[in-house]
């Protein structure tokens, strides 16, 4: 688009923007004649997909702002009225986290729903994402909307959508809603009701505190050991998010009095003053938690991300040092614990993703449980569980993805960092009752089912040239997949673009190795990156110290990674 056309489009957007703050922001960009800034803001509309919306706050259609959210909500409401005949009876849940502009975006969302004749069930205060997912099921709502950017930096916000089954939307609803949004009028012409008018018509309904009480009771019911511990010391961080009050309440009610919050991060604060990137996986994000744990000599550290749908775990090793568990290790621990110690089910079912460890599958097969691998994203886990429940009568026990997302049972149909924290504490108390530790239990599992080690490598390739390079790498591996990676033979090549095991087509390629290893190639859907996920399986010798086997496994994994990256360079990776 030339400069004149770009400025005309920006001025038209500015005049239709209902928010004086972003109106002024865009006027300032126009006044200084910053073509690059305008081009970025108007390069495209912020894409509505299976994760809803997520982007940097600011003016323009390629940013998160009140204009975008009003149009999005109008499109969603009209799609619901078309496809859910009783939407105007069931209503839509509206929740929000504590980020900048979340309150305003949630209020706009409810006001537009009300104007469309759909009751908005509104949380009056910030809440965890899993509570919004729970409310969708508990209130039998037609959908739920959660205003959150999860673990993104403070300049971001987002808009997550759940269908009436309590799970995040999947095709065809994502594309259908996006098409409906494209037909919506300019933002300043989208109808909305004031809070007072919506309340008077019964179209704005505050969600009572009792629903939160029900949620806490429900996740308390997920426990297996159910005895708590007066001696187990737990440090917890909310990472400046909304999980603090919920996690503390649940853990104390579960019988864990030695609960120490990371004081500097316990209260919601959308500025995230102690961390640049409020994701427990990021370097430095757990520094305050570690310091607190060393001060109080904690046995276990539990960390939620800001909207409390993820969980990170640290535990003491045999030498007494704190060690961060990987997402796969937590998933294997929780999955094994719930399958072996939980309520016995006729047809138990566990689910993970194609980029997570294959160890849960090995455990499920050994224990006679149904098992699925699905595409990346918890929406696929929840919807696959529902699908098999309906078709086969399976009973969902546990699902996880390696990026710290877990859910136990069917309290929510999405990842739940608060519920998972409670089950992990229950697991730790059970270990303590057996005179072992969390990592001691992990060693038991690894001795029985194999020692799986994994790693991820991300290669950033920005711009159009980078996107072309990423396509070239994927095309080259598809056209000529290797027969060996280093000294390891490739057993199978899985091209998910062609569909594998009935999964929707996805631009992912996996090389499965003889002996149980795997490398998975996946271009990021939100960043200019290609991601490689590696796994190696090692079988400890009888009587061999597991630490020794781990050193060998890590060395072999490193060699495997180096050999694969050499192949990637041959296929065009810089």
Image (cartoon, rainbow, N blue to C red):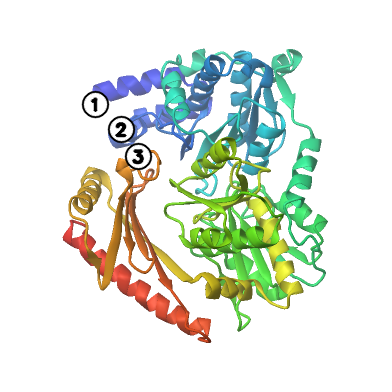
| Between discs 1 and 3, the one toward the N terminus | 1
Label 1 or label 3, whichever lies nearer to me, is: 3
On screen, 550 above or below 24? below
Does residue 264 appear in this view? Answer: no
Quadrant where the image shows the N terminus: top left
Circle 3 residue: 505
| Between discs 1 and 2, the one toward the N terminus | 1
Find residue 15 and report its horizontal and vertical position in percent.
43, 17
Which residue is rendered at x = 30% and y = 31% of the image? Answer: 33
Q: Is residue 223 left or right of residue 178?
A: right
Asked whether disc 1 touches disc 2, contact meaning CB atoms under 8 Å apart, the reply is yes
Q: CA distance from mark 1 to mark 3?
A: 33 Å
Circle 1 residue: 1
Q: Classify mark 2: helix, strand or loop.
A: helix
Frontmost residue, 486 versus 208: 486
Quadrant where the image shows the C terminus: bottom left
Find residue 486 and report its horizontal and vertical position in percent.
25, 71
| Between discs 2 and 3, the one toward the N terminus | 2
Does residue 171 appear in this view? Answer: yes
Q: Classify mark 3: helix, strand or loop.
A: loop
Circle 2 residue: 39
On screen, 110 above or below 457? above
């Amino acid at each position: 688009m030339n400069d004149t056309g770009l400025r005309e489009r920006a001025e038209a957007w500015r005049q239709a923007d209902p928010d004086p703050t972003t109106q002024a922001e865009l006027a300032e960009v126009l006044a200084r004649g910053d073509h690059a800034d305008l081009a970025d803001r108007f390069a495209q509309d912020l894409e509505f997909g299976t994760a809803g919306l997520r982007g940097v706050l600011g003016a323009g259609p390629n940013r998160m702002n009140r204009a975008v959210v009003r149009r999005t909500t109008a499109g969603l409401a009209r799609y619901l009225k078309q496809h859910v005949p009783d939407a105007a009876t069931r209503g839509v849940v509206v929740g929000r986290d504590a980020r900048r502009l979340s309150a305003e975006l949630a209020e706009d969302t409810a006001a537009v729903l009300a104007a469309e004749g759909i009751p908005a069930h509104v949380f009056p205060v910030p809440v965890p994402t899993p509570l919004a997912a729970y409310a969708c099921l508990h209130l039998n709502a037609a959908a739920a909307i959660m205003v959150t950017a999860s673990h993104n930096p403070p300049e971001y916000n987002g808009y997550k959508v759940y269908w009436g089954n309590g799970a995040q939307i999947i095709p065809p609803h994502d594309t259908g809603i996006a098409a409906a949004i494209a037909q919506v009028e300019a933002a300043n012409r989208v109808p909305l009701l004031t809070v007072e008018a919506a309340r008077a018509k019964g179209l704005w309904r505050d969600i009572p505190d009792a629903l939160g009480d029900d949620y806490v009771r429900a996740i308390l019911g997920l426990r297996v050991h159910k005895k708590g511990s007066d001696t187990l010391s737990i440090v917890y961080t909310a990472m400046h998010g909304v999980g603090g009050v919920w996690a503390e309440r649940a853990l104390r009610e579960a019988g864990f009095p030695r609960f120490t919050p990371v004081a500097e991060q316990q209260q919601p604060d959308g500025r995230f003053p102690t961390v640049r990137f409020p994701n427990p996986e990021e370097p430095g994000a757990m520094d305050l938690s570690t310091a607190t744990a060393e001060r109080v000599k904690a046995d276990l550290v539990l960390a939620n991300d800001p909207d409390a749908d993820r969980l990170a775990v640290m535990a003491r090793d045999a030498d007494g040092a704190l060690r961060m568990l990987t997402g796969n290790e937590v998933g294997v621990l929780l999955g094994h614990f719930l399958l072996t110690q939980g309520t016995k089910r006729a047809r138990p079912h566990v689910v993970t993703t194609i980029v997570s460890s294959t160890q849960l599958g090995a455990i499920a097969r050994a224990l006679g449980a149904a098992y699925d691998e699905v595409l990346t994203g918890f929406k696929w886990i929840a919807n696959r569980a529902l699908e098999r429940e309906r078709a086969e009568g399976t009973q969902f026990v546990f699902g996880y993805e390696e990026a710290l997302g877990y859910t136990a049972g069917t309290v929510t149909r999405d990842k739940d960092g608060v519920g998972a924290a409670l089950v992990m504490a229950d697991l730790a108390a059970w270990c303590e009752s057996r005179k072992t530790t969390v990592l001691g239990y992990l060693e038991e599992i690894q001795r029985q089912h194999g020692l799986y080690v994994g790693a991820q490598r991300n290669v950033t390739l920005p711009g159009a040239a980078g996107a072309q390079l990423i396509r070239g790498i994927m095309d080259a591996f598809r056209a000529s997949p290797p027969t060996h990676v280093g000294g390891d033979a490739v057993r199978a090549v899985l091209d998910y673009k062609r569909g594998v095991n009935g999964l929707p087509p996805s631009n992912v390629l996996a090389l499965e190795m003889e002996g149980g290893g795997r490398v998975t190639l996946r271009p990021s859907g939100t960043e200019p990156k290609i991601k490689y996920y590696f796994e190696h399986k090692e079988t400890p010798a009888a009587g061999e110290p597991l630490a020794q086997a781990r050193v060998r496994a890590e060395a072999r994994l490193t060699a495997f990674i180096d050999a694969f990256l050499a192949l990637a360079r041959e296929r065009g990776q810089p």
